Amino acid sequence: MEEILIAILDRIQEKVAGLSLIDEDTGQLEAEEDSYPVTFPCVFVGNTDINWSDVGLGVQKGDTQLTVRLAIDCYDDTHIGSGTTDKIRERQQLSTEVYKALQGFRINKYMGPMVRVKSRDYTIPGNVKVYEKIFKFYYHDESAKRDNPLRP
C-alpha cells in the first residue's frame, strides 16, 4: 500500500502547480502550529479505510477509500463588493485541479482506477478552508500469496 500512497503524492506534485506542501496526512492540520508548521496551499493524503475479501491462496482484494485534503489559508476578504471575489474562484479551481489529477489514476494492474465518491468543504480555525475528497479504488494484494518468493 505504501507504493500507492507515494505514487499519489508524486502524481499531485506532477499535476498540480502552486502547492507549498504535499504529504501523508498525519494530523498536521489539527496539530499545534508550533509543533508542525504548515504552509499553504497544501495537500494531505491518508485516512485509508480498506475492506478486505479473500480471493484464495493468501491473495486478498481490498475495496479502498482514501481521503485527500487540500487546505488553503483564506486571508482575503471575499464579500460581495470587496473586489476580491475572484479568490473564491481560485480556491475552487485549485480544488478541481487536485480532483482531476487523481480521478482515474492508477499505478499498476493491481490497483483499480481512483474514483471520487464524496467531497465536502469546511473551515478550521485560523481562516483555513479545507476541500476534502474521498476516492475509492480496489487493490489486489498478493504479498501473502502462498507461492510468493518474497513471503517469509
Image: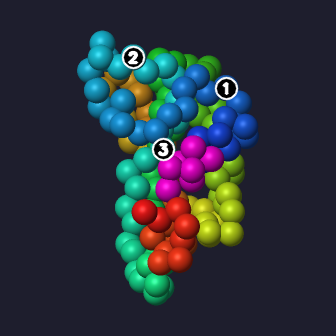
Q: Residues within 10 Å of mark 3 (few under 14, many from 20)?
A: many
SS at badge 1: loop
What is the magenta range?
1-7
Dot 2 amino acid type: Pro
Q: CA distance from mark 2 to mark 3?
A: 17 Å
For residue 85, the mark is none
Q: Is residue 74 left or right of residue 11?
A: left
- Per the image, the residue denoted by label 3 is 45
Amino acid type, label 3: Val
Residue drawn at the location 38% of the way across and 61% of the way down: 49
Q: Are marks 1 and 3 in contact (CB under 8 Å)?
A: no
User: What's the CA distance linking mark 1 and mark 3?
Assistant: 17 Å
Q: Is residue 148 visible?
A: yes
The picture places residue 80, in percent across and down from the top left corner, at 54, 28
| Residue 5 is inside the magenta segment | yes
Instruction: Point out the residue furthest to the left here.
Output: 32
Residue that badge 2 annotates: 37
Q: Is residue 66 above or below residue 87?
A: below
Q: Position of residue 23 (x, y in %)?
A: 50, 34
Coordinates of residue 145 in the picture (x, y in percent): 49, 75
Extreme bottom residue here? 56
Residue topped by disc 1: 18
